[in-house]
Amino acid sequence: LEAREQSATLGIQGKRAYVIICQGSDANGNGRAYHWNTLDYVRDQLTTCGIETGGDDPDVNWLATEDGTGDMPDGNHGNLEDAITVWARRKMGETPAPLYIVLVNHGETEQFHMYPDTLTASQLDTWLDQLREGLIADEEATAAEESVICILGMCYSGSFISTLAAPGRVI
């Protein structure tokens, strides 16, 4: 069996997109600084692509802090659920565009660590279903047809694929 390294570039330049970035944590904050570096790189790439990462109503919802303190909300269960089912629903309903969800931290089979919580693939799937159903209920059919792209930066991320797989989703 031959292993090959491949890289991909995701092009969103010149197009509108919404991004939820969630940095999870374990009880001891292990890997927080390392994961912050990854997210800082993601922010630079989003800025290069013209995605509004700051201001009064940015197109990026940050659920991460470099050291676990600061003015950004933590990447926890409740904040991620609200980002998907409330924030993304509002943004996509106002101006339809794809939604990117970036999760970065440690993981296990069917689990993403978000101390003190653990996110399961089934919970994320439920929130994504609620987002789509909410857009349909709001009579935002065009928005409900937009793609949702989940980028899972964690160990065992492949265990989420079969649960999250659905039309209009890229995992």
Image (cartoon, rainbow, N blue to C red):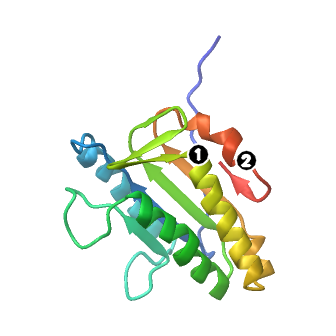
Q: Are marks 1 and 2 in contact (CB under 8 Å)?
A: no
Question: Mark 1 or 2 closer to N-term?
Answer: 1
The quadrant of the rendering that contains the N terminus is top right
Tell me the kind of residue under disc 2.
Answer: Ala
Q: Residue at x 67, y 48 (%)?
A: 164
Q: Which residue is mark 1?
A: 121
Image coords of residue 73 (percent x, y) = 32, 68
Left or right of 89: which side holds 165? right
Residue at 64% across, 53% down: 125
- Using the rendered image of the protein, determine whether residue 45 is visible from the camera's viewpoint: no
Q: Is residue 149 above or below residue 138?
A: above
* Rendering coords of residue 169 (x, y %): 71, 56
Mark 1 belongs to which amino acid?
A: Ala
Q: Secondary structure at mark 2?
A: loop
* 8 or 28: nearer the viewer: 28
- Camera-side residue: 49 or 115? 115
- On screen, residue 170 versus residue 90, left or right, reads right
- Please, which residue is most extreme toward the top here? 1
User: Is 20 positioned to the left or the right of 66 in the image?
Assistant: right
Q: Which residue is mark 2?
A: 165
User: Which quarter of the picture shows residue 143?
Assistant: bottom right
Crowding near pointer 2: few (<14 within 10 Å), some, many (20+)? few
User: Along the line of sight, which residue is nearer the eye, 16 or 90?
Assistant: 90
Query: Measuring 39% from the left and 89% from the top, which residue is drawn there?
Result: 56
- Between disc 1 and disc 2, the foreground one is 1
Task: Name above or below for residue 26 compared with residue 1.
Answer: below
Using the numbered discs, state the Cα–Cα distance from disc 1 to disc 2 in whole angstroms.
Answer: 10 Å
